[in-house]
Image (cartoon, rainbow, N blue to C red):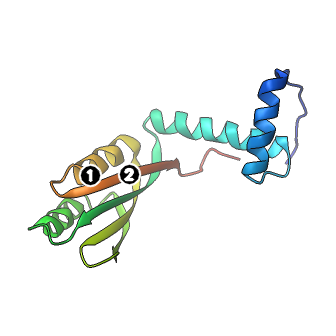
Amino acid sequence: MSLIRFGVSIPVTLIKKFDLLIRRKNYSNRSEAIRDLIRKELVEEEIEENGDAVGVLHILYNHHRRELSEKLTDIQHKHHNLILSAMHIHLDHDNCIEVIVMQGESQKLKSLADLLIAAKGVKHGKLNLTSTGKYLV
């Protein structure tokens, strides 16, 4: 892989904050951190353009809630073409978390996540999307 060097002018206060961030996140140098920031923006742009994405959704809920587990399973079966895998974890006597790995068009993944999170009885949920990496080097 060939590399290109370029200069960037940054105010002192901004570079000091950036250097603190680099240390907190354990980057070995500024170049690595800048490359990751660029990749992050490119991934977000790809997702916004409704490209192919991979998503990890977690939902936290009380498994004693009447018919909730069945409803969540039913929703997942209706969208089986988007779901790669699901893992159900018993956190304690009352609470469970499901981690669902999905792949497909980003807008479809967001809609499915919204449907699952909005199910009555779900306490919390969050979807994290990333690119499939096809276009990132």
**Where does the image place residue 57, in percent across and percent down from the top left?**
38, 57
User: Residue at point 14% right, 65% down?
Assistant: 68
Q: Secondary structure at mark 2?
A: strand
Res 116 → quadrant: bottom left
Res 65 → quadrant: bottom left
Q: Is residue 125 above or below residue 92?
A: above
User: Which of these two is toward me, 86 or 33?
Assistant: 33
User: Residue at point 31% right, 77% down?
Assistant: 92
Q: Is residue 124 left or right of residue 14?
A: left
User: Residue at point 79% right, 49% down?
Assistant: 23
Which is nearer the N-term, disc 1 or disc 2? 1
Q: Is residue 22 above or below residue 80?
A: above
**Please, what is the three-letter code of the amino acid marked with disc 1?**
Ile
The residue that mark 2 highlights is 126
**Please, what is the three-letter code of the amino acid marked with disc 2?**
Lys
User: Which of these two is toward me, 95 or 69?
Assistant: 95
Q: Are marks 1 and 2 in contact (CB under 8 Å)?
A: yes
The residue that mark 1 highlights is 117
Badge 2 local density, few (<14 within 10 Å), some, or many (20+)? some
User: Which of these two is toward me, 31 or 77?
Assistant: 31
**Where does the image place residue 18, in percent across and percent down from the top left?**
77, 36
Q: Is residue 7 above or below residue 2?
A: above
**Where does the image place residue 53, in percent across and percent down from the top left?**
46, 48
Calculate the distance from the C-alpha at mark 1 to the C-alpha at mark 2: 8 Å
